[in-house]
Image (cartoon, rainbow, N blue to C red):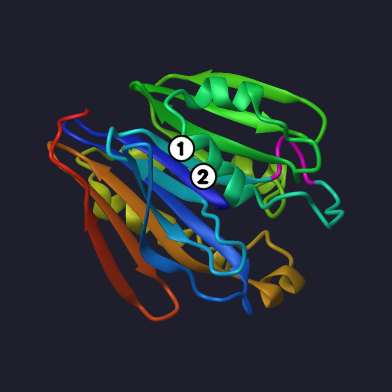
Amino acid sequence: MCTVSFFRTEDSIIFTSNRDERRVREKAVFPNFLEEEGNILYFPKDRKASGTWFVTDQYGNVAILLNGAFKNHESKPPYKKSRGIVLLDLMKTKDLLNAFRNYDLSGIEPFQLLVYSERKLFRLFWDGNEKYEVSLDENKNHLLSSKTLYDDKIEYDRIQDFNRFQSVGNMGYEEVLNFHKEHQIEKEPGINEIIKEKFVTVSITQLVITENRELRYYDLIDNTLQKQEIGKKNLV
């Protein structure tokens, strides 16, 4: 939920998300499913709050959570609801954008979402007071970082590295995965050592959309890989 990329190749779309968490947090459950009015959601489930940071559905819609909005904020719990639960609530609807506009976010900690719906890409922000919507070019690649852990300097350096990475050409999901592995929080030189003592990149979740769709979950602590096939509809 702290480093997210959208990457497009000639025949695929790849969503990848690093989950940076406190070292003492319980392991997530994957795969996990939720069916709501005929719509099936696929996601890794956070054991503590029962929400998620990465969810897709049978129609090819995708929503990925990052903590914080435009800048780092002071966390002031208790909050009304987990941001991961809010994400699932939004994805249960047929129109996520409209659901976000109408969702009561008072008492919810700031966050942002990367959303892919109806083949359109955009970012949604909640800064604790206001909601914001930003459209993105779905024909370009994008790298996002959580504002709660990565300051502007680190984010800028990462984007420059991402630009160099994508300029090589002939990239696929394995190359994107390796890029994310190189940018685990414990490997970032600009991160304060005190933060590294508390946080670690525990997993990488990746959705690869081609003629088929495959949700992949890399547990970096146990060094394991789990996969979930999701239909065969071509959504590229």
Q: Which residue is mark 1?
A: 92
| Residue 219: x %, y % from top left | 39, 71
Q: Residue at x 15, y 30 (%)?
A: 234
Image: 195 above or below 129: below
Q: Quadrant of residue 157?
A: top right
| Quadrant in the picture for the C terminus | top left
User: 104 or 229: nearer the eye?
Assistant: 104
> Label for residue 88?
2
Q: Residue at x 71, y 50 (%)?
A: 81
Q: Over which residues does the magenta segment extend? A: 68-72
| Residue 38: x %, y % from top left | 31, 37
User: 25 or 45: nearer the eye?
Assistant: 45
Q: Is residue 131 left or right of residue 134?
A: right
Say few, some or many: other residues with alpha carbon within 10 Å of mark 1 (under 14 / 14 to 19 / 20 or more).
Answer: some
Q: Amino acid at mark 1?
A: Lys
Q: Amino acid at mark 2?
A: Leu
Say few, some or many: other residues with alpha carbon within 10 Å of mark 2 (under 14 / 14 to 19 / 20 or more).
Answer: many
